[in-house]
Image (spheres, rainbow, N blue to C red):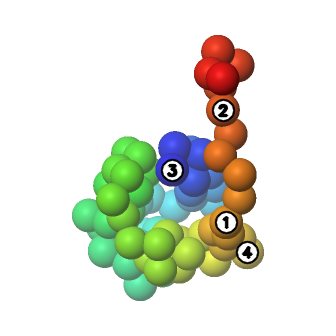
Amino acid sequence: MNRIAEYIKYNRRAAGLSQQEFAMRSGLGLRFIRELEQGKETVRMDKVNIALAMFGMEAVPGRIERKDNEQ
């Protein structure tokens, strides 16, 4: 989820939006946006996709990326 959190935070800032402005425009709660950007692992995927849709993106199934030191 950290990649999504980083993506949302980066693009929100690039769009010149505060967390509160982003929450209002997306129809999501400010608390959810804060938790999402902090990388909370138990967020609702339907809401994640609403946030991603603001940038023309969506979360889809994919392979787990492993760090170099993992087997």
Q: Quadrant of residue 52?
A: bottom right
Task: Specify the amino acid type for callout 3.
Answer: Met
The earlier-in-sequence mark between 4 and 1 is 4
Dot 2 lies on which element? loop
Dot 4 lies on which element? loop
The earlier-in-sequence mark between 3 and 4 is 3
- Residue 39 in the image: state x and y as whole percent: 41, 46
Q: Is residue 12 above or below residue 28?
A: above
Disc 2 from disc 3: Cα separation: 13 Å
- How packed is label 2: few (under 14 Cα within 10 Å), some, or many (20 or more)? few
- Pointer 4 residue: 56
- Pointer 3 residue: 1
Q: Residue furthest bottom?
A: 27
Q: Is residue 62 left or right of residue 16?
A: right
- How packed is label 4: few (under 14 Cα within 10 Å), some, or many (20 or more)? few
- Pointer 2 residue: 66
Question: Which of the two marks, 3 or 4, is nearer to us in this view?
Answer: 3
- Pointer 1 residue: 61
The earlier-in-sequence mark between 3 and 1 is 3
Q: Are marks 4 and 2 in contact (CB under 8 Å)?
A: no
Question: Which of the two marks, 4 or 2, is nearer to us in this view?
Answer: 2
